[in-house]
Amino acid sequence: MVTTEDFKYALTILDSHSPGGFIKRDIKIDLNSNKIIAIAGARRTGKTYVMFQYINDLKERGVAKDNILYINFENERLIGLNAKDMDMLLVAHKELFNPDGKIYIFLDEIQVVENWDKWVRKIYDTGNYQIILTGSSSELLSSEIATSLAGRNLTYTIYPLSFSEYISAKGLKVDKLLKYSTDRGTILKAVRSFLEYGSFPEIAVLGDNTRKLEILSSYFDAIFFKDIVRRYRIREINELRIFLRILCSNYASYFSSVRVLNTFKSMGWNINRATILNFLEYSSNVFLVQKLEQYEKSTTRRLTLHKKVYTIDTGISRLFSDINMGRALENAVYLELLRKRNKDISYLKLKSGKEIDFVVGERTKEIIQVCYDVSDPDTRSREVSALLEGAKYFGLKAAKIITYVFEDEEIIEGIKIQYIPFWIWALNELK
């Protein structure tokens, strides 16, 4: 049973071991809003350090340390906690500190507390607290908040580092003249590492590739056991492990439950299609993968069409298969778009059978192809012809092809085609 002393221990640990330096994230959270702030995302994407970032910001604004409460609910002393125990947190805080006025409460990994939403809603309604909480399940952003915190919350999703954040974490400096300098090789080396090992914050600052894979494996195990198996009470553990291996190896690709089912059957496993679809939903809920819908004006029809699946980080995929640089680049572009545009992204199947990788924007459309290497004339012709067809479909005068290194611009049939290297496109200051 959790006691007040357990809470005091958890609070004292943070106060006596203040976090050191962290990677500053490109996210703007409105702490002045009269709303509950929900921060969600996969494990180890940096949700806790976003909290630390804003704790430091509060201190710089003159908020007293005693008015800032942080607690991590994955602390071993708090296992088995439920909502009825949570008032002891406030009691413990007032025993240890002397808060005066508004209190900022940072609740880390809140999803492990049973019925957490009822307690959060109760103290929010008093008007005495600004509440910032994190969780490693997308249900924190959807069903749970929709039913319990509706109208009371602002929600933010944290992903692994963007390329801009990744460059900063590695201490690299970029300016507009870099692409003309021999130092460009340093950036291209960073791009390759970004694609091959992903961009979880801890991975970004490591130089040892073997160590990177060891850490990525520990991340996967935590997502597998804590976020999926435990949360959804999975009994088919071996089947789930095989499914995730298939899923993470086939990033930036169409998802077909029938194809996955056939793969299981070929291996001698007895599994049904409903279980496979449930596994996909759970994987999406805990942010291991993201699903991209096909562009279609009809919302109903859009839901019935094939979806493409992208992994939250290509480093996770490397645990199960060699990295395909073309698909890794497409995956990286999608995540960069997702960070900036959120839901206004889809792919387009053209009448000719060709495909546009990304259609971006709700009213004003932008179309983007991703091609690692356009040096082969047939490859370049295929990508350009798809863009020309897509541009005519939407009535556009310009389109982009994001590449690894190739940069150029041409006008074909009155449509400007811009070839732009990923690193230039991804760094905001060079767009």
Image (tube, grey):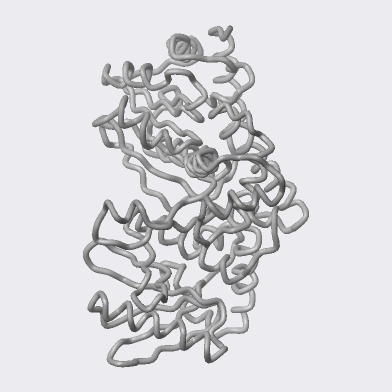
Q: In the rendered view, tell whether residue 115 sits above or below residue 345.
A: above
Residue drawn 34% across the image and 75% down it:
351
Residue 121 visible to the viewer:
yes
Q: Is residue 279 left or right of residue 214?
A: left
Residue drawn 24% across the image and 61% down it:
297
Q: Quadrant of residue 367?
A: bottom left
Q: Which of 249 and 265 lies nearest the eye of the viewer?
A: 265
Q: Position of residue 4 (x, y in %)?
A: 53, 8
Q: Position of residue 272 (x, y in %)?
A: 56, 40
Q: Is residue 174 left or right of residue 368?
A: right
Residue 42 visible to the viewer:
no
Q: In the rendered view, tell whether residue 179 sits above or below residue 117.
A: below
Q: Quadrant of the C terminus?
A: bottom left
Q: In the rendered view, tell whether residue 379 sits above or below residue 60.
A: below
How many numbered discs, if any? Answer: 0
Q: Quadrant of residue 196?
A: bottom right
Q: Which of 226 and 77 lies nearest the eye of the viewer?
A: 226
Q: Position of residue 232 (x, y in %)?
A: 54, 29
Q: Position of residue 253 (x, y in %)?
A: 52, 62
Residue drawn 39% across the image and 35% down it:
38
Residue drawn 26% across the image and 77% down it:
393
Q: In the rendered view, tell whether residue 237 sits above or below residue 83.
A: below
Q: Which of 129 and 148 lies nearest the eye of the viewer?
A: 148
